[in-house]
Image (cartoon, rainbow, N blue to C red):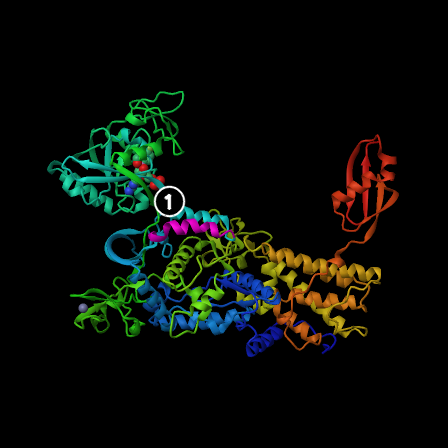
Amino acid sequence: MAAPEGQKYDPAAIEKKWQRVWAEQGLDVTPEDRDKPKFYALSMFPYPSGNLHMGHVRNYTITDVIARVRRMQGYRVLHPMGWDAFGLPAENAAIDRGIHPAQWTYQNIDQMRAQLQQLGLSYDWNREVATCSPHYYKWTQWSFLQFLKAGLAYQKEAAVNWDPIDQTVLANEQVDSEGKSWRSGAKVERKLLRQWFLKITAYAEELLQDLDQLPGWPERVRTMQENWIGKSTGAQVVFTTEAGDELPVFTTRPDTLWGATFMVLSPEHPLVAKLTTPEQRDVVTAYQAAAAAKSDIDRTDDTQEKTGVWTGSYAVNPVNGAKIPIWIADYVLMGYGTGAIMAVPAHDQRDFEFARKFGLEIKVVVQPQGETLEGNTMVTAWPGEGVMVNSGPLDGIPAGKGEGQSVAAAIQWLETNGKGKGEVNYRLRDWLISRQRYWGVPIPVVHCPSCGTVPVPDDQLPVELPQDVEFSGRGASPLAQLDHWVNVPCPSCGEPAKRETDTMDTFIDSSWYFLRFADARNEGAIFDSAKVNDWLPVDQYVGGIEHAILHLLYSRFFTKVLRDRGLLNVDEPFSRLLTQGMVQALTYKNPKTGKYIPPAQVNLEDPQDPTTGDPLEGFYEKMSKSKYNGVDPEAVLAKYGADTARMFILFKAPPEKDLEWDDADVEGQYRFLNRVWRLVTGFIASPGADVGANGSSPPAALTKPEKDLRRAIHIAIKEVSEDIEGDYQFNTAVSELMKLSNALTDAQCTDSPVYAEGITTLVKLLAPFAPHLAEELWHQLGHANSIHREPWPELDPSALVADEITLVIQIMGKTRGTLDVPADSDKAALEQYARESEVAQRYISGKEVKKVIVVPGKLVNFVVAS
Ligand code: ANZ
Ligand code: ZN
């Protein structure tokens, strides 16, 4: 159907119309036919805060383009969306505003779903999940019980990270490198509590090894995971106290054992009380109390001066019988190795500082080449290479971790003499999952005085969150105060028992949602394994780098455990990962006051603080409320429509790079879409238009303009396809679309079937990027089906074959001759042709060429010294 001439591009009308039609037609419902190859495209699902921000828009647009291209390429695509809906903000809203967390959350979900739908994202909404729904968390609880059955969930009393603002414990992964909570930013405190853990350490080695299976992940993320797992190889060496108690230590340098001149125990070490002599009791107790108040991060901060106290006791060095004092110090952590170390001050810097401070013996056992270190005079530890000395059987062996070197020799000696053995340690700790909060998944166990910890039977799941909770304030788990909920008969013996009142860390909810999407409406099982095995792994996962460790490590762990329970058959959940860059915006700050000024109040010509008159600094920074630099997606959609917003986001920067918001560039994309609109509607209205033509056959006898246009069309197909296939270089793909549109605008063969092919191709290539506009134009071109069901344009390599062009050769700006060369020659090739030409030989031989100016496709000009 031809458009009435002069009709303008009206994104608001077009977008609303097609979103409605697509929903009615179920266009994005996941196909079930197994004969097509599958493609699972997934964006990290959001926390339903209530408002979509530009970071979301970017994330989801990237994934949507990938999903749309794959559909056109003939894949059956799974592209779902859901809500990571448990978590503290809902509970805090309840406390602050008296609205129930469920109500607050579901309202936000409705609002955000509507915003997502406005963006034209091709989700299969039939598979939407919300982790706070009992239909979902029933299976989160069921998974937990799988862990329990496998011996991978357990309770223990532990010194935990306590967030004093959110009044809950945090996992190690949720405490940043400064010892602050990832959520509240509060300095984390330590507390001794009985908590639930998942045994992620049982999978440490596999989580490390299988990183090799993930070449499609950014190197940076794999390295971060590797460092977090922190594999360390060495030995366990058994020391004994004078009283005969065994004191095993973990060391990465068993070769330095002959240089161990004292031992250090963690202040929490269980033997400290027994080892402490009456004379030392007071100082030891005081030191223990001080250490307990410090975070692990502060304790291991190498810039702080070492502290510690002597227990009054001695141990025996198992290799030489030396009597060495046993100290306690907070730089030794109870959670790592055995919580006790052998201190080798000559070769370990921390031990060195400690020994110097307290006047302990320093004994050199590795002599660096060409030097003779002395314990009394050395100024820092020597951790490096050299030759073993003062070390009995190791003397003369080169120090090092390689084959035939000291570490291997030491382990061999320890094993032969029964004094220790080779050992591997990981920095990774078990995952602490208990949270003393309401808005999370109740841990499905009951504590019975006679049976102990009893799992809630599967047929009694879900253990639902009670609705009638009082959110009076923070401090204690609201669940613990609900007697009618807490008191239940023991599922095993029927006697009065109590429910567990901790809820699970919300990172558990997101550790398996990508599995549920394969079978989201299953009420009888967590999922049908056949469906999960069909869809998994996720072929392309897109999300923020902030999840490099937490979510991505936990999800890998969950996948492996469920695999080992026989529920699925993949080793890794996400084959490719794209971590998209941040969306930044121009930000203004008064350097004197440190205050941020909303850009709307700033005169861009002469940026001044409106209140003080100080000149402002302007720079790009991640959009955030606190910096007043956020751009509201709603406003952009209202002004330009979703297609322009999508085009801008894709065009402005490659997906993994930061993107600087720029209104002028948004405007530029809007103009481009208007140009496409005019181009296509103009074509439809033109009298000679062969509107129905869906491509041209490669005719032998094309005119030159037809040939040129056809070449431009197929270059666009080739470039856009390659840009998408490789590293998702959507920015250059959009540039190629612009080039094709220019070629069509300039074309001198508007009545030719080649022109019709060009129009059709442009609209098809545009479809994944600007899905509404493309669909509208497609229908105006007379098609009844959706463009999103069309096959991706096929490349005709024969169309790419370059014609010849006539290259002008100039010397000092004067035309001296011409040469026919392949039209696709690049600058270097053109220069080469020109240099070798007869004309050039004649005019420049013997002269010095100062400069060569190449105008691609046109001329080469030699500037020579006169
Ligand atoms: C003796 C020694 C000599 C050490 C030497 C190092 C150098 P990574 O690489 O992190 O595994 N260590 C062991 N357990 C500890 C704990 N609970 N708290 C603090 N430090 C602990 O480091 C292992 C090394 O850190 C171990 O090797 C031990 O010191 C220390 F020239 O033993 B070493
Ligand atoms: Zn019981």
Residue 166 position in % (x across, y down): 32, 59
Q: Which is more toward the observer, 161 or 41?
A: 41
Residue furthest out toward the front:
416
Ligand 2 rendered quadrant: bottom left
Residue 34 position in % (x across, y down): 54, 70
Q: Is residue 157 left or right of residue 600?
A: left
Q: Which is more toward the observer, 545 or 90?
A: 545
Can you tell which quarter of the image residue 308 is in?
A: top left
Residue 273 position in % (x across, y down): 15, 43
Q: Can the viewer see residue 652?
A: yes
Residues drawn in magenta: 201-215
Q: Residues within 10 Å of mark 1 (few under 14, many from 20)?
A: some
Can you tell which quarter of the image residue 793 is in?
A: bottom right
Q: Residue at x 46, y 71 (%)?
A: 128
Disc 1 marks which amino acid?
Lys
Tag count in the figure? 1
Q: Which is more toward the observer, 367 or 291?
A: 367
Q: Secondary structure at mark 1?
A: strand
Residue 76 position in % (x across, y down): 56, 68
Q: Residue at x 76, y 74 (%)?
A: 685
User: Which residue in the structure is indicated by mark 1?
Assistant: 231
Q: Is residue 292 above or below residue 684?
A: above
Q: Residue at x 43, y 65 (%)?
A: 515
Residue furthest out toward the left:
278
Prevalent SS, magenta region: helix
Q: Is residue 345 left or right of residue 230?
A: left
Q: Is residue 68 above or below residue 195?
A: below
Q: Which is more toward the observer, 12 or 106?
A: 106
Q: Is residue 680 left or right of residue 418?
A: right
